Amino acid sequence: MSENGSSLFRRATGQNDRKTVTFGDAAAVQSLPLWSALSLAALVLFWWAATRTWGFPAEFRAATKADFAANGERFTQAKMLVQCNGAPADVCDESMYTQWLSPRSFPSPPDTWSGFKMLWTDGYKGVTLLTHAGTSLWRVLRGMFWGCLIGIPVGMAMGLSSRLRGIFDTIVELFRPIPPLAILPLFIIWFGLGDPSSVKLLIFASVWIMIIAARAGVRTVNLSKVRAAYSLGASKWQVLRRVILPNALPELFTGIRVALGVSWGTLVAAELTGTGVGLGTMIFQAKNFFLLDVVVVGTATIAIIGVLMDMLMRIVEARLIPWRGKG
Amino acid sequence: MKDLKVAGIDMVYAVPKGSPVHALSDVSFDLEAGRLLTLLGPSGCGKTTLLNILAGFLAPTGGTVTLGDDLITGPGQERGMVFQQGALFEWLNVEQNVAFGPKMNGADKAETKEKVEDLLRTVGLQGFGDKRIYELSGGMQQRVALARCLANDPDVILMDEPLGALDALTREKMQGLILDLWKDTGKTIVLVTHSVEEALYLGDRLFVMAPRPGRIERDYELPFARTGLEVEPRALKASPEFIDKREEILSLIWEMEEEIMGHEG
């Protein structure tokens, strides 16, 4: 076996082929796209295999398929099982097939796909998936907006003045550990169900994170930069606006990313209490009627939006603060 | 041009637990406009403290600093500062860094642009205006720092170990640049350094400072900075006069170091 061709890991590290110390060189470790694709494929394959029926008599399978084709209907695993349960015992019964996950606990890929199409065009309770997702996202953005608008000035003030730090420190440290969902009952009593309380809950979820990020960002400023600015004729306001604020941008950005993640998670949970429209509400109501395809599509939408938001933030970050981690 | 007058500066730092530290004791000197003063001494001699007082970043516990007729009470743009490193603004490009001072003063944009281009040419960075700070080497970053400081046309330039973080070769090149700038602009420069050779080569006047309490131990008038403008730097640094002075100052500093060790041992 040749030394170089022996593993995928070595080939992927390219210019590091001449390194003799590879195990422990943690900085050189990177996520290999090929392996990511493989693991994703394995996950889908497992899903397909676990929800599929195995061992159905071939004739029965062919007959049902032809039956559905004749009616102009899509052939799905779930429909085939219904067919089977209604068929005479000698044609088909439960002892003839195995299935690891029944449609009552998890929908198969084709069922999920048809569920998605249904949600996309007709929607759930007359509200399309896009509207549900958009409503949830809009709530998160409004919560983040107010969270930043309140949190960043307060955090910066705490970073700039010992007195203000003293005043706000106890409050921040006391409220920060409270899980947003624990305060939700109070918010519902005060503000009612739906938008008013859910957006205020999101402000509560993000504001502490933004305060801490802004406080940390202010602290990263090098005294030399501040002194240089004053020596160049800057006023206090100009030092704040032209030095301390841009210098804090990397930390603020980290804060926004963390707060977005937390807000998104909090929101969906908050919507479970019923807000009419929203991914969380959709999932929870569908659960009551055992519409598992709706539940799964809703959950997947949450995951995908989460990933997309993070990707977007990375792109914006690379544009806005290219100096991060350099020099 | 304005003379710098330092009269009876005392600087005592209160220490939370322990006796107060006497960083500077009765430091007095006059520096005529257009001189290049270098400050040299073992650590703890208060040379950076003195520079920070001149810049107005620290208020002395006693004594006064005046520039021309003006008493120094805080930072001001008639005294520019060049730091060792980390004082450039990473979020701005080279041009914007240099233009920072004029912009803070609300200067005319077109005029500033012209001035910035001029300054970049002076420090050898023409064509680098739109580069980001992190894209530059350490030496180039210090060139930007010099240009940024000059943009406000200060009377005095204060330099806190400006070449301390550079490699030996870059350092020599930058020493040449500082001498050229000094000659061309006629500015008063006060430069703190750890390197005896650098202090001798650049200093038209040199203070060797001593610690505990921080004070001026020797005040040298030096010929090298002025000749250094015409003579090849390596030849100057290898000349007998230069080497004699270097050894003299080195042994002076060594004596101080030994005294400090005696105190601590």
Image (cartoon, coloured by chain):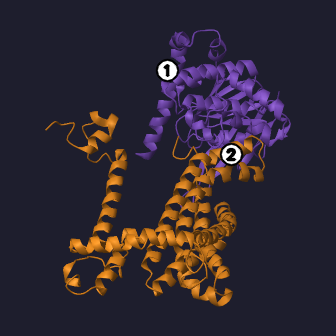
Chain colours: A orange, B purple
Badge 1: chain ID? B
Badge 2: chain ID? A
- Considering every residue shown, the one lying at the far bottom of the view is A189
User: Residue at position x 64%, y 76% from top?
Assistant: A199
Quarter of the image for residue B155 reads top right
Q: Using residue B110 as the reference point, say whether residue A84 is left or right of it.
A: left
Decide: few, some or many residues near mark 2? Use Cα within 10 Å; few <14, some 14-19, many ≥20: many
Name the residue tied to disc 2. Answer: A227
Quarter of the image for residue A143 reads bottom right
Relative to A242, residue A124 above or below: below
Relative to B230, residue A235 above or below: below
Quarter of the image for residue B121 reads top right
Viewer-nearest of labels 1 and 2? Answer: 2
Q: Position of residue A54 (x, y in %)?
A: 23, 72
For the N terminus of chain A, which image quadrant? Answer: top left
User: Residue at position x 72%, y 53% from top?
Assistant: A240
Amino acid type assigned to the residue bearing label 1 in the image: Glu
- Cα distance, mark 1 to mark 2? 36 Å
The reply to whether label 1 and label 2 mark residues of one chain is no
Q: Position of residue B111 (x, y in %)?
A: 83, 30
Name the residue tied to disc 1. Answer: B247
